[in-house]
Image (cartoon, helix red, strand yellow):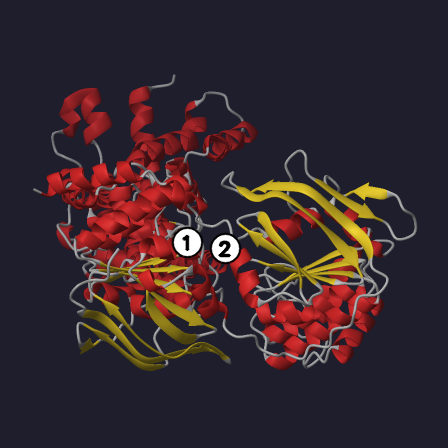
Amino acid sequence: MSAPANREVAVSLRNVTKTFGSVVANNDISMDIYKGEILSLLGENGSGKTTLMNMLAGIYAPDGGQIFVDGEEAVIRSPQDAFDYQIGMIHQHFKLVDVFSAAENIILGMPGKMKLDKKAILKEIRETVDRYGFEIDLNKKIYEMSVSEKQTVEIIKVLYRGAQILILDEPTAVLTPQETEKLFFVLRAMKDHGRTIVIITHKLQEVLELSDRVAVLRKGEYVGVVDTKDATESSLTEMMVGKKVELNIDRTDPENVRDLVRVEHLTCLNKYGIKALDDVSFTIRGGEILGIAGIAGAGQKELLEAIAGLQKAEPGSSVMYRAIDNNDEIQLLGKDVNDIKNLGISLAFVPEDRLGMGLVGNMGMVGNMLLRSYNEGRGIFTREKEPRELAEEIRDKLEVSTPNVYTPVRKLSGGNVQKVLVGREISLAPRVLMTAYAVRGLDINTSYTIYNILSDEKKKGVGVVYVGEDLDVLIELCDRILVLCEGKVSGLVDARTTTKEEIGLLMTKYSGDHIAKIDLTRLMEDEEAEVEREE
Amino acid sequence: MFSLVAFIPRAILQGMPLLFGCTGETISEKVGSLNLGIPGVMYVGAICGVIGSFLYEQSCDRQVVPIIAVLIPFLACLAGALLMGLLFAFLTVTLRANQNVVGLAMTTFGVGFGNFFGGSLMKLTGSAVPSIALSATSKCFRKSLPFADDCGAFGKIFLSYGFMTYLAVAIALVTAFVLTKTRVGLQLRAIGENPATADAAGIDVNKYKYFAICIGCMIAGLGGLFYVMDYANGVWSNDAFGDRGWLAIALVIFTLWKPNIAIFGSILFGGLYILNLFIPGAGMATKELYKMLPYVVTIIVLVITSMRRKREHQPPEALGLPYFREDR
């Protein structure tokens, strides 16, 4: 795990800047990647890790700054260019053709004889496979493969193209502990063969376990780089989350707090059959804002969806809702989405694709208001008067800038779309208002508008759930913060007394637990066998 | 009396236009372009061949040189179909227009184009019947091997056809080989399945799409030419080609996007299409029921493949979708 002896630079980034619209994803970043090292690129969600590496892989072109490969300035405009510089990236979303076999995917786009000589091709790939000790059936179709096998195919694909520098984007996010162990073994074998490896991650344990050096990004800025042997979990966390920033969000003390939704032992499976939520218990209270913090994919989405009736829960789970006018508790699990909505539980989910869920892009504000109330009318005709009035009210109150309420919402800016979505949910006078990433991609002023809306709802006695990414905001806006880690509750803290470091550590509390369990002796044996094969 | 020796050659002749259309459409669909303009392309291919042949026959007063009589309509047909292909590719690949809309529009256009020029030619000849006969050219197209007649039933079933029948089979076999056994085929299929992946692998998606669409249209156009020159004995009458273009598209689904299977599929479809003529005592209404059979068979195949859900038997995943690189 020692740093490479000869610190020869493989890739240098100099003053690299990338913006998307008004959002600065990478600001003036300069860093070096050394030959033959494993470098971890660490940072929270949205800190610009993937964007930075995408510029090396030819997916994005930098707006400013220079990239040097082996000391010479490189212009990387496409994935093909990146391959020519021997840089290969394994994306989080695999780029594989499902109905092709592993071998077919690996040779896709490569020059060679026109007629496919299956035997010769398999032999060639087999050489690469054996050199690094992969376990893969090259004739297997991609659609029959597990996630880990697909990832292996992607890695072989990149190696087969002669990549010297491999970039892996969150490679362990989709793997089981055993598969992670196997991947780390392969990555070390590649390092021993002189390959340079960059792994993008936010799992501290893995960083400490695997890498030689750690470079940290925060909110698009380059914080610094440390040798892994000098780093600890808390020192890295501090670099990742940074000093506390004063935001001046107007937070009132909660009044008339009462329990609204009691979640007990909630367990959900994701589409791979892995537990997305594992025995989660907490309470949503009226009159306060409950923040939910966690790394992307820690179970936030499933949690909100399970409460809203969009996600199936495993037996033993319970979500009890206490109605306002009497003390009867109602079990929400198993109820229809519309019934839950009618009880006053509203989900304003703002996913990455704002128009994908909740709003119809080609409809105007009025049409989108109608979507929530179409079944209230009588007869077969829709009534347009109320939705139009509502749309106008939201436009005025939330200062949505739109030519008129009939302009298709897809033509509005992201912030305005978000205001429409949140405004519509609030107009239903919900008892519980759940939002996820409500301010993602918004400018400061619009963000404050949304914070104020949520605070107003809280004052009305609504139970507000705020899933957020920015820890500063969570601490300033919320009353209590529930921290999720790998689908489990890793902590419930008082937002007024907690610190960013505390939440940061809770967010990664369980991740990488399995690494301690790796059977080191077996790995050593494998490595010996590897050496023998080499000879 | 039902005679297999009489039936099979008729079925094959009936099936070949479908085979041309089906092979062409398969190539196009393999790169993700659902070209519903194929019926129109076949019409255009046919009428372009007819125009070329008509002008040639007029110029030499029907004293045709066989090789030129074949080449002129053949090249005219390819040129017409190629232009249709370029139009479809320009609209759907470069401008990213909706493939279904463009395809349907091209079919409507192609049929109208064929009927308009067919009508014009009829007017030029001033003939009493509403058709143009190009018997001299057709004779060249239908020329079979000289010893075919001496080989009995074998000769009748396998050797009694003009060169285009063998061309259709050859094209289907070559296409099947290229698609499954070569690098170009692998790249074409990758584009139809997952254009983003193909792009990331350094394949020029748009270039390949243009290429496949145009080649596909040219092959399909030959189907129209075959119909007029071989099947119909060189007689063009408006709308006679009928719904064979749609049948060719149905055949693509029936054969699970495999041109080698399409050789047998086309003969089966051709046989089903004319079965009614060989069933004694079938009335007008029953005949129409028989004509339905190819479609019924296609629906049955669709139901079975959807139920089995075997991934290899599904349409290309990106079929009908435009591709923007910026969506990555």
In the picture shown, does residue A95 fall above or below B173? below
- Say what amino acid the circle numbered 1 marks: Gln
Task: Give the crowd class for mark 2: few <14, some 14-19, many >=20 residues within 10 Å.
Answer: many
Instruction: Check the image and name the residue furthest to the top.
Output: B1
- Say what amino acid the circle numbered 2 marks: Thr
Whether residue A109 sits left or right of residue A502 in the image: it is left
Instruction: Check the image and name the residue furthest to the right.
Output: A325
Residue A91 in sight here: no
| Percent x, y of residue B136 | 22, 48
Instruction: Check the image and name the residue furthest to the left.
Output: A535
Element at label 1: helix
Subunit that carries the residue with mark 1: A
Residue sitting nearer the eye, A115 or A441: A441
| Percent x, y of residue A188 | 25, 50
Residue B160 lies in what quarter of the image? top left
Marks 2 and 1 close (CB-CB < 8 Å): yes
Element at label 2: loop
Do marks 2 and 1 both belong to one polypeptide chain? yes
- Which labelled disc corresponds to residue A508? 2
| Percent x, y of residue A452 | 73, 75
Whether residue B259 sits left or right of residue A354 in the image: it is left
| Percent x, y of residue A61 | 34, 75
- Which labelled disc corresponds to residue A107? none
Subunit that carries the residue with mark 2: A
Residue sitting nearer the eye, B35 or B122: B35
The residue identified by callout 1 is: A205
